[in-house]
Image (spheres, rainbow, N blue to C red):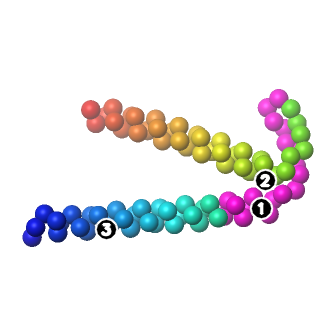
Amino acid sequence: MSHDQVEAPASSKADRKERNRRIAALVVGVIIVVFAIVNTDKVKVDWIVTSSSTPLIIVIAVSFVLGLAVGYLVRGRRAKAADARRH
């Protein structure tokens, strides 16, 4: 058995895993968009320093972006900690 034959299944498995992650991300994205679109009513929002009547879609979008930012920051810290443990 050659070296190339051994690596092919691992590459195929990685491709499948990446494809599945993209499909899952697309499904979640579609759900978020549909959820935001059907929630366009104005709601009273107590922001940190003020209150206002804001479309619910804006509240959902802001929450989503803040969640992405927190996830990105946590992921970065975990990656740095993992690198530190390896070295």
User: Which amino acid type corresponds to the residue marked 2 in the rendered image?
Assistant: Ile
Q: Would residue 84 be counted in the magenta stretch? A: no
Residue toward you, 44 or 5: 5
Q: Secondary structure at mark 2?
A: helix
The residues bearing labels 2 and 1 have C-alpha atoms spaced at a distance of: 7 Å
Query: Please, is residue 23 above or below residue 51 in the view?
Result: below
User: Which amino acid type corresponds to the residue marked 3 in the rendered image?
Assistant: Ser
Say whether disc 1 or disc 3 marks the residue closer to the N-terminus: 3
User: Which amino acid type corresponds to the residue marked 1 in the rendered image?
Assistant: Ile
Callout 2–callout 1 Cβ contact below 8 Å: yes
Q: Secondary structure at mark 3?
A: helix
Q: Which residues are magenta?
A: 31-49
Number of other residues with Cα within 10 Å of mark 1, as a class: few under 14, some 14 to 19, many 20 or more: few
The residue at 85%/51% (across/down) is: 55
Residue 22: percent from left, percent from top = 49, 62
Number of other residues with Cα within 10 Å of mark 2, as a class: few under 14, some 14 to 19, many 20 or more: some
Question: Which numbered tag is attached to residue 57?
Answer: 2
The residue that label 3 is drawn on is 12
Question: Which numbered tag is attached to residue 13?
Answer: none
Numbered marks: total: 3
The residue that label 1 is drawn on is 37
Number of other residues with Cα within 10 Å of mark 3, as a class: few under 14, some 14 to 19, many 20 or more: few
